[in-house]
Image (cartoon, helix red, strand yellow):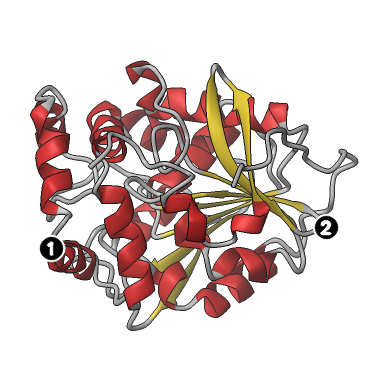
């Protein structure tokens, strides 16, 4: 069990591998996927995931958008940054540095879970000027209790991240595929075997687990909640009715803060709704982004095509 995923091993059959590139931005090396043509769209995955979570959605969106989907710092094949960069403001700045390096201005930002918070923070901090934001089961508000797992933020993570052995122990546990399957089922979603295998492959690497824990430990959504009334781009809240990670009722709490927010509820789907029904999610994103005009910016470019 190595410390971090290796492109030469786990990347050999990585979803949408042909779109993968590597480049340096913000002081470290990123794995990013770029595909399609049209208005610019940025995809931001949630804590504990990586670009594999867009395996079904990215090709659908690439029919109408120029899509950029990075592995967030410390996740998947992207290097682990300094600890402060795993906070919400740090993550937003890091993604903004990547966007600048790619010469890419997103007209639409789509974020899943913690990725939705990064999208909102980028807009609120003036780091991006999207014309629409789509939150997929977004973690936009401080949690009021609930089960703890790699997709949510908790006080427990602050303790765990201080113990170097913890990521190793979790990774060792992930060698039992059934344990990963139970964890994913706990989100309220049902994934196919290939989807489970991809999460298991990442979770077997302590660096990926450590980044997820570090992100949860550094996260503070109170400031974001206070700033949400200032969010300018139209916000669409896509909510899996069976989400057991982010309470579906949180969408109503967000709309109470930001009355212009639109809620789309998906019956029978859980926290990983975009992996369960990518076609449904793509249709919602296309509708939300229909008013987002393409910007007069060059197509994003990246160096270092993946070896092997």
Instruction: Residue at 66% x, 54% y: name it.
Output: 19
Q: Which structural element holds mark 2?
A: loop
Instruction: Please say whether residue 136 is visible from this viewpoint.
Output: yes
Mark-to-mark CA distance, 1 and 2: 41 Å
Instruction: Residue at 40% x, 29% y: name it.
Output: 88
The furthest residue to the front? 308
Instruction: Residue at 23% x, 41% y: name it.
Output: 153
The residue that label 2 is drawn on is 38
The furthest residue to the bottom? 268
**Which image quarter: residue 180?**
bottom left
Q: Position of residue 24 (x, y in %)?
A: 61, 24
- The vertical placement of 194 against 99, above or below, is below
Q: Position of residue 170 (x, y in %)?
A: 13, 45
Q: Which structural element holds mark 1?
A: helix
The residue that label 1 is drawn on is 179
**Left or right of residue 262: residue 188:** left
**Left or right of residue 302: residue 221:** left
Mark 2 Cα shell of 10 Å, populated few (<14), some (14-19), many (≥20): some
Mark in the foreground, 1 or 2: 1
| Front residue (pair 102, 227) | 102
**Left or right of residue 123: residue 121:** left
């Amino acid at each position: 069990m190595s410390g971090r995923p290796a492109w030469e091993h786990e990347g050999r059959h990585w979803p949408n591998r042909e779109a993968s590139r590597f480049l340096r931005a913000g002081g470290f090396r990123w794995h990013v996927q770029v595909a399609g043509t049209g208005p610019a769209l940025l995809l931001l995955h949630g804590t504990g995931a990586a670009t594999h979570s867009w395996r079904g959605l990215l090709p659908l969106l690439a029919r109408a958008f120029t899509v950029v989907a990075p592995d967030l710092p410390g996740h998947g094949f992207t290097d682990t940054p300094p600890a402060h960069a795993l906070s919400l403001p740090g993550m937003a700045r890091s993604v903004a540095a990547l966007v600048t390096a790619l010469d890419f201005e997103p007209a639409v930002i789509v974020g899943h879970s913690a990725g939705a918070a990064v999208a909102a923070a980028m807009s609120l901090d003036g780091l991006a000027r999207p014309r629409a934001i789509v939150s997929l089961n977004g973690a936009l508000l401080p949690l009021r209790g609930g089960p703890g797992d790699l997709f949510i933020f908790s006080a427990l993570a602050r303790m765990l991240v201080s113990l170097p052995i913890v990521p190793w122990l979790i990774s060792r546990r992930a060698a039992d595929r059934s344990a990963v399957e139970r964890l994913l089922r706990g989100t309220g979603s049902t994934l196919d075997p290939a989807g489970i295998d991809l999460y298991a492959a990442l979770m077997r690497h302590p660096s990926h687990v450590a980044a997820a824990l570090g992100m949860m430990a550094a996260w503070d959504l109170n400031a974001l909640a206070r700033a949400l009334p200032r969010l300018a781009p139209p916000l669409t809240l896509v909510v899996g009715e069976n989400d057991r990670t982010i309470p579906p009722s949180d969408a109503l709490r967000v709309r109470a803060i930001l009355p212009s927010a639109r809620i789309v509820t998906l019956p029978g789907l859980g926290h990983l709704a975009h992996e369960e029904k990518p076609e449904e999610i793509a249709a919602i994103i296309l509708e939300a982004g229909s008013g987002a005009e393409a910007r007069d910016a060059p197509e994003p470019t990246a160096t270092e095509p993946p070896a092997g």
